[in-house]
Amino acid sequence: MWLFALFVAVPLIEIALFIQVGGAIGLWPTLAVVVVTAILGTSLVRAQGALAMSQLRDSFGQLNDPTEPLAHGAMILFSGALLLTPGFFTDAIGFALLIPPVRSAVFKYLKSRVKVQSFTMGAEQETYRQPQGDDVIDGDFTDVTPDKKPTHPGVQGPSGWTKH
């Protein structure tokens, strides 16, 4: 229900702000502000995105938890979408998400609301489970499949470049 309210409220807020700002400064300056914020937002998103990517690479390189850099990257991506959407309200939220302390505060809030069950890094290790039940027979096997002969005359078999 709250998502429906958001989808109704945001366009209404944007329309009201367009009417207010357009009445105060006029149509063409209002449209110019919308275009300039989209251009400025795109350049800021590019710069912040590059910074977030370098932090993510550092996190992977040092084998640290990549959750925060990934969350920052997602918020920057969301910010870019908001800044490309025409409107003053969405631009304000988009520009706010480009400020690193704001993103950190949003991350801390979201982190307090999400419970992580498990987190692993690196290769999974195989574990041996003891079979349960009386109908399980433990055994070893050897593959005795004969080498395949070529089916066409004159074909010598694999070239050795591929494994079979």
Image (spheres, helix red, strand yellow):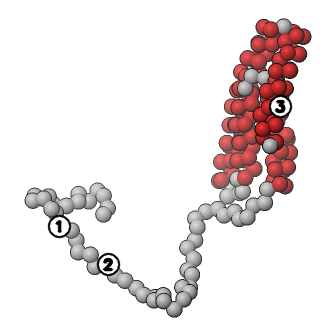
Neighbor class of circle 3 (other Cα within 10 Å; few <14, some 14-19, many 20+) is: few
Instruction: Please name which of the two marks, 2 or 3, marks the residue nearer to the observer.
Output: 3
Name the amino acid type tagged 3: Ala
Q: Residue at x 42, y 87 (%)?
A: 139
Judging depth in this view, the residue of 3 and 162 nearest the camera is 3
**Residue 136 point in image, percent of width and height:** 48, 87
- Residue 98 lies in what quarter of the image? top right
Q: Which residue is mark 2?
A: 143
Q: Which mark is residue 83?
A: none
Considering only vertical position in the picture, is 47 above or below 14?
below
Q: Residue at x 21, y 68 (%)?
A: 148
**Residue 44 point in image, percent of width and height:** 74, 29
Q: Residue at x 64, y 62 (%)?
A: 121
The residue most toward the left is 153
Q: Which residue is mark 1?
A: 149
Considering only vertical position in the picture, is 20 above or below 80?
above
N-terminal label among 1 and 3: 3
Considering only vertical position in the picture, is 152 above or below 38?
below
Give the quarter of the figure containing the C terminus: bottom left
Give the quarter of the figure containing the N terminus: top right
Q: Is residue 157 visible?
A: yes
Name the amino acid type tagged 1: Lys
Q: CA distance from mark 2 to mark 3?
A: 67 Å
Q: Which residue is mark 3?
A: 9
- Residue 3 lies in what quarter of the image? top right
**Residue 116 point in image, percent of width and height:** 75, 61
**Residue 26 point in image, percent of width and height:** 84, 7
N-terminal label among 1 and 2: 2
The answer to whether 136 appears left or right of 74 in the picture is: left
